[in-house]
Image (tube, helix red, strand yellow):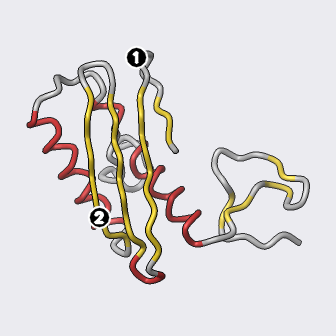
Amino acid sequence: MALGLSPKLPLSLSPSDGFALNKTIPEVVKQNLKNLMLTNPGERLMDKDFGIGIKNFLFEPNVSFIKTTLSKRIEGQIKQYMPFVQITNLAIEGNENELYLEISYNINPISFGDRILFTTTTAGSIRTT
């Protein structure tokens, strides 16, 4: 029987585990952070406040107000839903058709640092790395 902490999303088959699994705490935290960033507020059942919805900011004018609003939303959501994660750097760049978002973070209980990048295309799709 395969041992893992959670299934990897999107679901995919693994020859050794059945479904591919997240097997470390950093993998689970990164996946949960991606989920928090990509979920639109009101989309999660029973918790209308969950989610940042970065796609909602894609075609907004690139003004400091939007960057400030997005960064406050990110910081507030992480503080509420992932209090064990500390943001060490938050960079938001882009224009009306593109968005580049980089979050460097530390998982405090295990003293592990990582970063996650969100980039958009002009078609509106979001890539994460």
Q: Tell me the tag on residue 122.
A: 1
**62 versus 34 height, above or below:** above
Q: Is residue 13 left or right of residue 121?
A: right
Percent x, y of residue 57: 27, 31
Q: Amino acid at mark 2?
A: Thr
Residue 22 falls in image quadrant = bottom right
Please name whichever residue, 110 or 57, is drawn nearer the observer in this view of the structure: 110
**18 versus 125 height, above or below:** below
Label 2 to label 1, Cα distance in Å? Answer: 29 Å
Which of marks 1 and 2 precedes in the sequence?
2
Q: Is residue 76 left or right of residue 43?
A: left
Q: Tell me the tag on residue 13.
A: none
Q: Is residue 97 left or right of residue 8?
A: left
Q: Tell me the tag on residue 88.
A: 2
Q: Secondary structure at mark 1?
A: loop
* Residue drawn at 24 percent across, 23 percent down: 95
Q: Amino acid at mark 1?
A: Thr
Percent x, y of residue 66: 15, 35
Please name which of the two marks, 2 or 1, marks the residue nearer to the observer.
2
Number of numbered discs: 2
Percent x, y of residue 110: 48, 82
**Residue that protrudes farthest toward the top in the picture:** 123
Q: Image quadrant for the N terminus? A: bottom right
Q: Secondary structure at mark 2?
A: strand
* Residue drawn at 73 percent across, 70 percent down: 4
